[in-house]
Image (spheres, grey):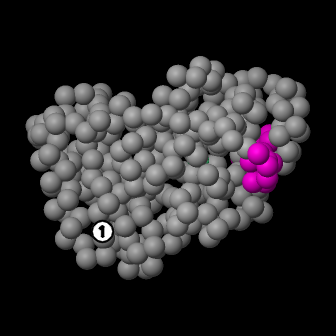
């Protein structure tokens, strides 16, 4: 496995790698959710590049950029074990050299949910993902459904700018009790960790109501709010039932919707989502 830290070396390497080429962008501190993406890429493509880069521009000024969990040695061992060909792990200065002033801004679908809670977040994500696509030129790029709005934004941006890579989305990987895997789960205290699976229980309850014939989006939101408000350690940041493509809040569930929520537990805000209303 080749570990590359400069853009110039990555550009040279990508031209030598056999096609199809798959890219798995990550911020490191890898878990089984990332490994699912890597294995999917390995199964689909002849070459696999994984990137590890904690991207400062997608963190707000009061967010956890400095303390975001990092473990490069462990990450490299995990990627080596899955047969990844190249790890691209640039420094911040390499990706954002002095004078850097060009950003990618995806309009409308970035305004609600995580975009409202974290101003500037998707500008940072769209910029770095566009830059990774430009440097690596992957045929296929792999993202997890756990970050549902990120997936919608990246699909929109890739189509709008004809970035020429296929976006492959892998289902959310969960702990046995339903908690979605996330690098930020390490922030939870034992009591918060014990309460956290309620996010997925609330999402499953919405799905159950939908399957039972409920089509009123407000009824789904109200029931999830009722469930989560009963937990003293949880503070709801948003609960949403929105069109899966445009992320506009829905009034009825007549086509695929993303049911999503963000809930604060102490230091960590956990997000999760499911899609309902499509082919189930
Ligand atoms: O999902 C992530 O880990 C990040 O947002 C991504 C896509 C690697 C961009 O920094």
Residue at 64% from the left image edge and 68% from the top image edge: 66
**Label 1, on which residue?**
235
Q: Quadrant of residue 226?
A: bottom left
Residue at left offset 61%, top offset 52%: 57
- For the record, the magenta segment spans 82-99
**Label 1 neighbourhood size at 10 Å, few (<14), some (14-19), many (20+)?**
some
Residue at 19% x, 50% y: name it.
Answer: 221
On screen, residue 44 versus residue 77, left or right, reads left
Where residue 47 appears, x then y in whole percent?
A: 76, 32
Secondary structure state at the residue bearing disc 1? strand
Give the camera-side residue of 154 and 103: 103
Determine if residue 169 is in view: no
Q: Position of residue 253 (x, y in %)?
A: 19, 34
**Principal secondary structure, stretch drawn in magenta:** loop
Asked if the stretch drawn in magenta spans residue 94, the answer is yes
Q: Quadrant of the C terminus?
A: top left
In what quadrant of the picture does the N terminus appear? top right
Q: Is residue 265 magenta?
A: no
Percent coordinates x, y for residue 112 in the rendering: 36, 44
Q: Along the horizontal axis of the image, is 61 left or right of 210?
A: right
Residue 26 versus residue 197 in the image, above or below: above
Q: Which residue: 27% across, 53% down? A: 239
Q: Is residue 168 left or right of residue 13?
A: left
**Residue 114 at what x, y percent from top left?**
41, 50
Residue 243 visible = yes
Q: Nearer the viewer, residue 169 or 93?
A: 93
């Amino acid at each position: 496995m080749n570990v590359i830290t400069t853009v110039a070396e990555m550009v040279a390497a990508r031209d030598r790698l056999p096609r199809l080429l798959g890219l798995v962008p990550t911020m490191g501190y890898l878990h089984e959710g990332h490994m699912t993406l890597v294995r999917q890429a390995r199964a689909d493509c002849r070459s696999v590049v994984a990137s590890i880069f904690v991207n400062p521009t997608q963190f707000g000024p009061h967010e956890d950029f400095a303390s975001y969990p990092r473990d490069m040695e462990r990450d490299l061992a995990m990627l080596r074990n899955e047969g990844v060909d190249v790890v691209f792990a640039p420094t911040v200065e390499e990706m954002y050299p002095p004078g850097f002033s060009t950003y990618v801004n995806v309009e409308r679908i970035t305004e609600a949910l995580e975009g409202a809670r974290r101003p500037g977040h998707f500008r940072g994500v769209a910029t770095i993902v566009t830059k990774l696509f430009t440097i690596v030129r992957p045929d296929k790029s792999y993202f997890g459904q756990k970050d549902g709005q990120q997936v919608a934004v990246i699909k929109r941006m890739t189509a709008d700018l004809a970035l020429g890579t296929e976006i492959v989305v892998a289902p959310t990987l969960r702990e046995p009790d339903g908690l979605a895997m996330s690098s930020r789960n390490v922030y939870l205290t034992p009591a918060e960790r014990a309460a956290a699976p309620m996010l997925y229980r609330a999402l499953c309850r919405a799905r159950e109501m939908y399957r039972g014939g409920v089509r009123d989006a407000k009824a789904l939101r109200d029931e999830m709010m009722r469930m989560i408000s009963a937990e003293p350690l949880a503070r709801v940041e948003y609960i949403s039932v929105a069109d899966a493509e445009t992320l506009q809040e829905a009034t009825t569930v007549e086509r695929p919707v993303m049911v999503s929520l963000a809930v604060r537990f102490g230091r960590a805000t956990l997000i999760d989502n499911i899609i309902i209303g499509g082919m189930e």
